[in-house]
Amino acid sequence: MLKSIVILYMLLLNSLFAETLYLESGFKRNSLVELYTSEGCSSCPPAEKYLNNLKNNENIWKNLFPVAFHVDYWDYIGWKDRYASKQFGQRQSLYAKLKRTSTVYTPAFMVNGLSWRAGIFSDSLRDEKRSAGNLIVSVKGELIKARYKLNHKIPLKLNVALLGMGLKTFIERGENEGRTAKHDFVVVGFKSVSSENLQWTTTLPELHYTQSKKYALVIWVSESDNPTPLQVVGSLLPSYKNIFNQ
């Protein structure tokens, strides 16, 4: 059974990347927008709607890259979030430990490692004006090659997130009982790899949720002990038939 799953996963990767995908950030710092959310959180739907609407932003996949990390720390109140992973809550807790946010809560936005809220006066994201290193990535099949052009003396991590797009869930219990949740930019596979020479050769992350029909890919670099992104690239991936549903 496990062997069959591995074979299907490899076929999925091949269908995602039949051709080599090239991504390059340029030297101006791009924006990673992180939303920490849960289907068990009654106040999260408006934040998710805001994030979902970013797919219509003129800067999407140019210098704007949203990701939704579903956390599992609300699962106990009646509804288990099928997109959640324990490591996402740990990532959010690290931000709090580093004083980048006051506490751990949902919904919570982080924009380039700083806490942010959409307000009544402005829903606009910060305009990044400072320069950053140039992140260059190629993806072929499951293989990722990346290099970061920046004078940086400490080890850095390459963070790779596969995103599920156009997801829907009918929530049967908990605070959102009876609601149909619509999700975009959901992290359904995530990994981090360290490097001391600012070059990486790695593979795509395994998926903890395998039923998406549309995907996107977001990749960013960060310091080893700090989740704040230094530079980020990404792309919406071509639609394909989800072989896991065959």
Image: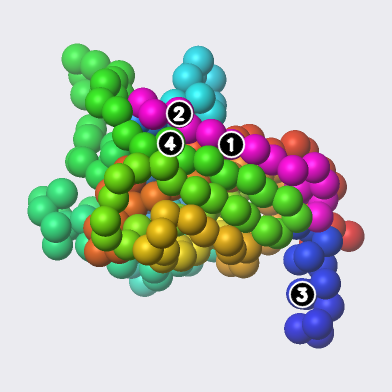
Of pointers 1 and 3, the one earlier in the residue sequence? 3
Label 4 Cα crowd, 10 Å radius (few <14 / some 14-19 / many 20+): many
Residue tagged by mark 1? 23
Disc 1 to disc 4, how far (Cα)? 10 Å
Of pointers 4 and 2, the one earlier in the residue sequence? 2
Marks 4 and 2 in Cβ contact (< 8 Å)? yes
Disc 1 to disc 2, how far (Cα)? 10 Å
Residue tagged by mark 3? 6
Residue tagged by mark 4? 134
Disc 3 to disc 4, how far (Cα)? 34 Å
Of pointers 2 and 3, the one earlier in the residue sequence? 3
- Measured as percent of width and height from the top left, residue 207 is found at 62, 64
**Magenta segment, which residues?**
14-28
The furthest residue to the right: 246
Of pointers 1 and 4, the one earlier in the residue sequence? 1
Task: Check the image and report above or below for 90 versus 123.
Answer: below
Residue 38: image quadrant is bottom left
Q: Residue at x 83, y 72 (%)?
A: 7
